[in-house]
Amino acid sequence: MPESKPTSSPQNGILEKWFHLKENNTDVNTEILAGLVTFMTMAYVVIVHPAILSGAGMPMQPLVVVTALITAVSTIFMAFYTNRPFALAPAMGSNAFFAYAIVAEGLATWQQALGMVFISGIVFLILTIMGLREAIVNLVPRSIKVSVGAAVGLFIAQLGFSNAGLVTARDGLLRIGDIKQPEAILAIIGFFLIAMLMALKIKGALLWGILGTTIIGIPMGITQIPDTFISTPPGIGEIVLQLDILGSLRLMFIPLMFTFFAGDFFSTMGTLLGVGGKAGLLDEHGDLPGIERPFLVDALATTFGSLLGTSTVTTYIESASGVEEGGRTGLTALVTGLVFALMLFFTPVATMIPGAATAPALILIGLLMMPAIVSIDFDDFTESLPAFITIVFTAFTFNLANGISLGIITFVLVKLLSGRRAEIPAGLYVLCLPLIYYFYLL
């Protein structure tokens, strides 16, 4: 009998039409796999984020639902509107600033803090619609843009080491963690398991490695099997539309809102450029074509999230995990968003995945993002120093916004001091003023 040729299913045809898979050198299976990997590396947000905001006196259970909901909706919107493999969720760092630096310190109520997030989201929207966010990105020197990939790599690797307990902060210094702890041992096992799969070029190495490490964690007592796998989501009326916009309109709150704004702006920019570079989406100038679209999604997500009852929503650096698995289009983000939507009913399943299982994947992704450093012009000190500052301060302060902001300030100063003022775009002088103010507020 003649061999039958495989035919494209109608579903594949629809997905091809929506996401242009062939044009981006990918396929449905690769994108689905990439979306699942992205989900698994950031599933922790559904538990960690509510736990942080509960420190502001907000109810835990509604926060779990809202976190999964805003992550799902914003990521699915990103999928269809931008056709990029980026996932969004409430930002780590901003949530701690919200809960501990503002509410716990008595500077404002959590309702007023949500009002500040809403206002910063509206400012994001206005700047995006006016094209100012894209214009600011275009002002950023190429040396800093190309260094962002390596900065993101160190950032995400450090996140993995921290989640695994392999590195801890003590006495103001980073030190080796207690590697005799079961979590650290499991992370080490997972690290070499994933490394082996990647060395063998096994398709889906990150996904299979995370799943395998999770299973190994069961007899070690780290992976906890829940009593039930399905749960009905509780109501969210306690936090939805509870923001106090009028109460947040105070002069004393402007520095707090600016901190929300600056942190999210440069964190999002760094993630889009760093992950976009790894996916091969950047142009010859180190820019992401059509960056205004993910910026708009990011702004809308922050605004809508504040209405639902959560702090700033941002593009997640863990999107790099899906990109490493081959994700190149919005189908990756769509899969991630849909799985987060399912989490509304299967939260116990997602919470089974321990941090020690996803941490090794993040560490190895950090390694794979380091080649971006070869694009830095090390023959020109005025270009390499800002790039170096960007990478080092991102890693050492655990904050992309800090690294990029200091890199820009360094670029302007070193060019001025070396008599190369003509190489500084006029707009960078203006941009440095709010960046200096940002560091003054820290």
Image (spheres, rainbow, N blue to C red):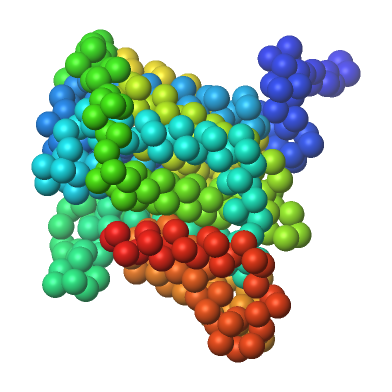
From the viewer's perspective, tell me whether residue 191 is left or right of residue 162.
right
Q: Position of residue 274 (x, y in %)?
A: 56, 55
* Relative depth, front residue between 222 and 261: 261
Placement of 327 over or under 58, stated as above or below: below
Q: For residue 127, which quarter of the picture?
A: top right
Q: Residue at x 21, y 35 (%)?
A: 53
Q: Nearer the viewer, residue 433 or 242?
A: 433
For this view, does 101 lie left or right of residue 395?
Answer: left
Q: Where residue 51 sits: x, y (%)? A: 19, 36
* Quadrant housing the C terminus: bottom left
Q: Position of residue 33 (x, y in %)?
A: 54, 34
Q: Residue furthest front?
A: 251
**Residue 236 figure quarter:** top left
Relative to 100, residue 175 above or below: below
| Number of numbered discs visible in the structure rendering | 0
Q: Is residue 252 above or below residue 66?
A: below
Relative placement, left or right, of 410 versus 128 is left
x and y percent of residue 386 in the render?
Answer: 53, 75
* Observer able to see residue 311: no
Q: Residue at x 86, y 16 (%)?
A: 1
Residue 116 visible at all = yes
Q: Is residue 158 left or right of residue 75?
A: left
Q: Residue at x 15, y 24 (%)?
A: 59
Furthest residue in direction bottom, as rendered:
418
The residue furthest right is 2
Between 146 and 40, the residue placed more toward the observer is: 146
Q: What residue is rendered at 19% in x and 48% in y? A: 101
